[in-house]
Amino acid sequence: MSTPDIIDTLAGIKPGSALDAIRAKRLQARENAQKSYLSLFEPIDAGEFSLLERAAVAAFVTGLHGESPVASFYRDKLAAAAGGAALVRTIDAEIARGKTSGPYGSFPAGPLSVENTAGLIYRVDADSKSALGPRLVAALEHAHLLVFRPRDAAAADMKALQAAGWSTTGIVTFSQLVAFLSFQLRVVSGLRTLAAVNA
Amino acid sequence: MNATVNPPDVFTQDELGWVSWIEPLPEAELTERHYAGLVDRARAKSEYFRLLVRDPEVLEARTKTDKDIFYNVADGLPRAERELAAAATSRYNGCIYCASVHARFASTYSKRRDDVQKLLDEGVKADLGERWNAVVKASVALASTPIAFGPDNIRELRSAGLDDAEIVDVINGASFFNWANRLMLSLGEPSK
């Protein structure tokens, strides 16, 4: 049996409901949001970005958005991953330290500089570093930037990931994973809101 | 990284280039697996897509999600307003490149170039009329972290004339650009 549609599951959309019918009108989008999820979390090749790293980054990113069915899902996924249970407390502590409101950050110097907004420049707690290891330390710091202040991203951030052992292909998949979750969280939140208004 | 990069410092509807900060795959190394990931073979000419094609399965699924959300206009929200959601999201997140592409599309499909430019110039609080204001406000609420989208956004979209299927198109379009913006902003930069 194929994996149940993850957005429908997280948004609580039941077969035969009004929202099920609306989603069916964008069948290619629905099926490919699902394929995106599967190719990120059940990849053909996890050599450049391990399944444990994927689960840890996903729990962190979704947790930074606050408690939700999506955050619970990925927290459970981390707990169930090989080696993941030992990381749950550390990731939870880092979520608590990293929580803030976005988007903020700086624009290229010029007329838009008046819109620059300062905010938390998150760094992993020194006490969490040994449990996470250098690759995940760099990944969480970059994931926080992607979540809250993507307009601050610079070439130097790529170098920081590379210095921590990330390959170019690993950086691409990692960036896709954080960016995809940014999408998935919002679709689920939007659909749940619409369903609640109609209930 | 590249001495010829000339980054824009304002939001614009002009055509911009995009330069990767890390190494895209060389065109000569692309296999059929990569071309499947690119979906359109012509995308092999784009530095951005040759970078993302390092993970072809994710790129293929991302691209097909994108195309259906924006190009499937057999029913639902007019293309112009899907593009408006994309442009507003990009304006709010700060993606000058994405905003340029989707502001152009919004202008083309709506014939309201001046209003689109107002969004770019004044930002997401620009007054664009009830219907567009509701779409922009919903997009901004979705782009915020924590997500701020709520029942008031649904009510405003409805009173602006959108039905539930059209509201789902706004949710999909705005949400998708929270995906696209983060890739474009973090893997390279725009150039005039």
Image (cartoon, coloured by chain):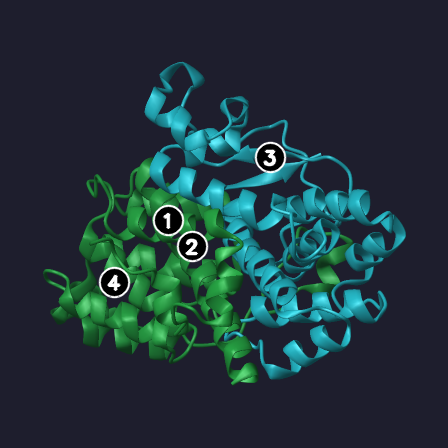
Residues tagged 1 and 2 counted as in contact (Cβ below 8 A)? yes
Pointer 1: what residue? A36
Are the residues under badges 3 and 2 in a single subunit? Answer: no
Q: Which colour is chain B painted?
A: cyan
Location of residue B88 in the rendering, given as x and y in whole percent from the top left corner? 69, 59
Q: Secondary structure at mark 4?
A: helix
Q: Amino acid at mark 2?
A: Phe
Residue A23 appears in view = yes
Side of A125 where A27 appears, left or right: right
Sequence-wise first label, 1 or 4 = 1
Pointer 3: what residue? B18
For the residues labelled 3 and 4, the Cα–Cα distance comes to: 31 Å
Location of residue A161 in the rendering, given as x and y in whole percent from the top left corner? 34, 47
Q: Nearer the viewer, residue A22 or A126?
A: A22
Q: Secondary structure at mark 3?
A: strand
Q: Amino acid at mark 4?
A: Ala
Pointer 2: what residue? A180
Q: Nearer the viewer, residue B82 or A2?
A: A2
* Vertical relation: B154 (above or below) B14: below
Are the residues under badges 1 and 2 in a single subunit? Answer: yes
| Residue shown at the point (38%, 78%) measured from the top left | A68
Letter of the chain that mark 1 sits on in the rendering: A
* Vertical relation: A23 (above or below) B60: below
Sequence-wise first label, 4 or 2 = 4
For the residues labelled 4 and 2, the Cα–Cα distance comes to: 15 Å
